[in-house]
Amino acid sequence: MASSLTCTGVIWALLSFLSAATSCVGFFMPYWLWGSQLGKPVSFGTFRRCSYPVHDESRQMMVMVEECGRYASFQGIPSTEWRICTIVTGLGCGLLLLVALTALMGCCVSELISRTVGRVAGGIQFLGGKYRWLKGLLIGAGCALYPLGWDSEEVRQTCGYISGQFDLGKCEIGWAYYCTGAGAAAAMLLCTWLACFSGKKQKHYPY
């Protein structure tokens, strides 16, 4: 089967897909933050949560509904920081997934990915995966902004009313937060470098 990738490029394609899938799964799952409310476990993502309180009219008291779902509207997300986090992280995951699928297609299609195209793809992965220290960039910005929303009323109810920005209170960081960050870090540290050596030299045909 014809391929436009070198052996290094095939490794790049597989790692790109794994890192994109890891970030996308982490972004979608509502397990970025763990806490409890009314004796029930509660978890949050950026735009989803599991378990929420409702008023039981028959018993005239608050009870917990133990199910997961997204917020009813974008404005329903508890804080402005989490809304921004949702946008930039989602965009970053989308870019990583786009590059990963293009890279996988390069395994089967000849002359799809040249060395120049590979380097451009690596640059996109760097933009999509830049982590922590440049907060203006996509998934890294989302991971960095997320703790700024820990002072919202919903989070404080879950974290013992003692949480604040970058202060977990009685809550814990969930696996999905680490999963999203790990995928982004892999894209930046490994995939960006491998992308520079992924494409074969294009043949020049005399016409």
Image: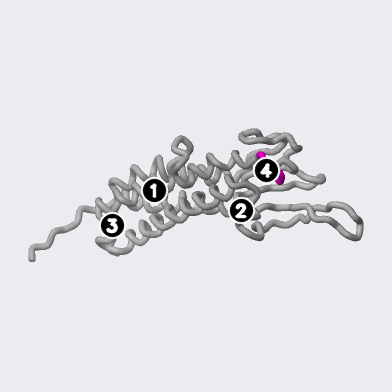
Q: Position of residue 164 (x, y in %)?
A: 66, 35
- Looking at the image, which residue is at 20% across and 53% down? 201
Marks 4,3: beta carbons within 8 A: no
Look at the image and tell me in which quarter the C terminus lies: bottom left
Residue ID for mark 4: 152
Residue at disc 3, secondary structure: loop
Residue type at mark 3: give it. Ile
Q: CA distance from mark 4 to mark 2?
A: 14 Å
**Residue 47 - label:** 2
**Residue 81 - label:** none
First in residue order: circle 4 vs circle 2: 2
Q: Nearer the viewer, mark 4 or mark 3?
A: 4
Q: Nearer the viewer, mark 2 or mark 3?
A: 2
Q: Is residue 161 visible?
A: yes
Q: CA distance from mark 2 to mark 3?
A: 35 Å
Look at the image and tell me in which quarter the N terminus lies: bottom left
Residue ID for mark 1: 125
The secondary structure that dominates the magenta segment is: helix
Nearer-the-camera pick, 112 or 69? 69
Pointer 1: residues within 10 angstroms few (<14), some, or many (20+)? many
Residue at disc 2, secondary structure: loop
Nearer-the-camera pick, 153 or 11? 153
First in residue order: circle 4 vs circle 1: 1
Q: Position of residue 22 (x, y in %)?
A: 51, 50
Q: In the rendered view, does 69 fall on the left or right side of 206?
A: right
First in residue order: circle 4 vs circle 3: 3
Q: Nearer the viewer, mark 3 or mark 1?
A: 1
Q: Position of residue 102 (x, y in %)?
A: 36, 59
Marks 2,3: beta carbons within 8 A: no
First in residue order: circle 2 vs circle 3: 2
Residue at disc 1, secondary structure: helix
Residue ID for mark 3: 113
